[in-house]
Image: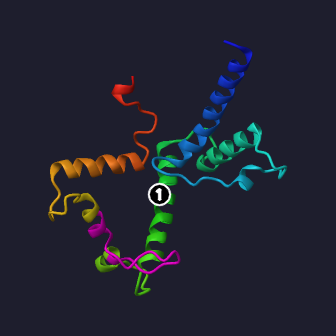
Amino acid sequence: MTRNNIFKMLALSSAIALTLPMAVTAGPGKHERPSFEQLDTNGDGKITIDEMKARGEARFQAADTNGDGLLSQDELAAKGSERAAKHAAKMIEHHDADGDGQLSQDEMKAGKMGKKGKGGHDRGAKMFEKADTDGDGGISKAEFDAMKEKMAERRGKKHGKKDKAEQ
């Protein structure tokens, strides 16, 4: 291996190691991605490895509520609960058509015209329509499996896996 390749491998390994604390504190699923400005803490127009490391350490410390340097199951669950509460608040904000702070089944189905101009449609019906690729009013096993595959790809669950034919 050349010196340049060794450096590249070390840089890649460091980047992966530095993002691990952020992924751990984010829990399963999506996590908030920081902006460039949030990562460039000294404002010099560059993100350094030290700034990335500091971000990961700060997130870990925020999740470590008892300060013991370890993340317990309760601390990880609390972080997940915090995210769930934020998600619930956003759902109510976007779908609560009558403004009562609660969601009826009709509000959940229909949505509400929001800031982005989305809403006013039955998302379940739209998904059904997309899955029913032959338009016969029913979803076959093949259509179901195809939609499931498409959704998994969108969620990135296949990220990094190679097709068996490529191996």
Q: Is residue 116 magenta?
A: yes
Where is residue 133 drawn, in percent x and y? 23, 58
- Is residue 57 shown in magenta? no
Q: In terms of depth relative to the viewer, which is nearer, 85 or 166?
A: 166
**Relative to the observer, which residue lies in front, 162 or 115?**
162
Numbered marks: total: 1
Tell me the quarter of the image containing the N terminus.
top right
Q: Amino acid at mark 1?
A: Ser
**Main secondary structure type of the part rendered in magenta:** loop
Query: Going by the picture, which residue comes out furthest to the front?
Result: 134
Residue lying at the far top of the rendered structure: 1
| Image coordinates for residue 53, horizontal then vertical, percent | 70, 39
Looking at the picture, does residue 91 appear above or below residue 155?
below
Where residue 110 sits, quadrant-wise, is bottom left
Question: Residue at the location (69% across, 46% down)?
Answer: 55
Residue 88, position as x, y percentages in the image: 44, 67
Q: Toward the viewer: 92 or 37?
A: 37
* Rendered location of residue 126, percent (x, y): 30, 68
SS type, badge 1:
helix
Residue drawn 59% across and 44% down?
22
List the single residue furthest toward the bottom.
98
Q: Which residue is mark 1?
A: 81
Tell me which segment is drawn in magenta: 110-127
- Residue in view at x 81 percent, y 50 percent: 45
